[in-house]
Image (cartoon, grey):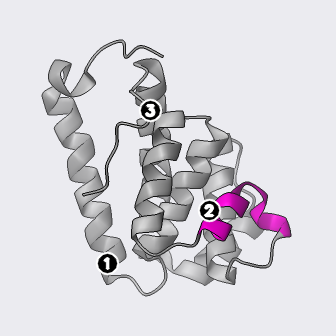
Amino acid sequence: MKTRLNYFANAPKGMEILMQQEDYLRGQFLESDSVNLAMWELVKLRISQINQCAFCIDMHSKDALKAGETEQRIIGLSAWQDLPWYKDNERMALEWAEAISAGHPISDALYKQALNQFGEKALVDLTIATNAINSWNRIAKAFTSKVGSYTPS
């Protein structure tokens, strides 16, 4: 698929804001006991699968592997609910992210479970992270970023 345009070149200030958000989240998840960088990669990859963003699936699967994630867990992520390879906190993060991404009201039960699992600060950060990957997915899909071109730093 041909790339339509370079969104970084055409809206550098807007992209800088999104990159600053990524820097904020990386810092929070480096310091967090309840939501870590590996879990963040799983969330980004899962939401990218749901949104069918090929560029982001490529990117986040590579980043997850580089961060030490196993191929088995990456391959199984689309069926995480039925596989025993994910910890309780990862399951909660994935369930929360999927619910946020669906755009439906969040039930009180799910909210309470997520709040108990993560605490207020981490839950807000996880929600920001979920919104961020949804935003990146939509940008990459709209302008057809070149799949396979990403190399982890």
Instruction: Tell me the residue at 30%/66% (across/down).
Output: 26
Stretch in magenta: 71-82
Q: Indicate whether 7 appears above or below 88.
A: above
Q: Position of residue 142 (x, y in %)?
A: 45, 19
Instruction: Tell me the residue at 46%/72% (across/down).
Output: 38
> Looking at the image, is mark 1 or mark 2 nearer the viewer?
2
* Chain-order first, disc 1 or disc 2: 1
Dividing the picture into quadrants, the one containing residue 14 is: top left
On whether residue 2 falls in the magenta region, the answer is no
Q: In the rendered image, is residue 43 in sight? A: yes
Q: Which residue is mark 3?
A: 147
Disc 3, SS: loop
Q: Viewer-proximal residue, 69 or 7?
A: 69
On whether residue 75 falls in the magenta region, the answer is yes
Name the side, left or right, on which 81 lies relative to 3: right
Disc 1, SS: helix
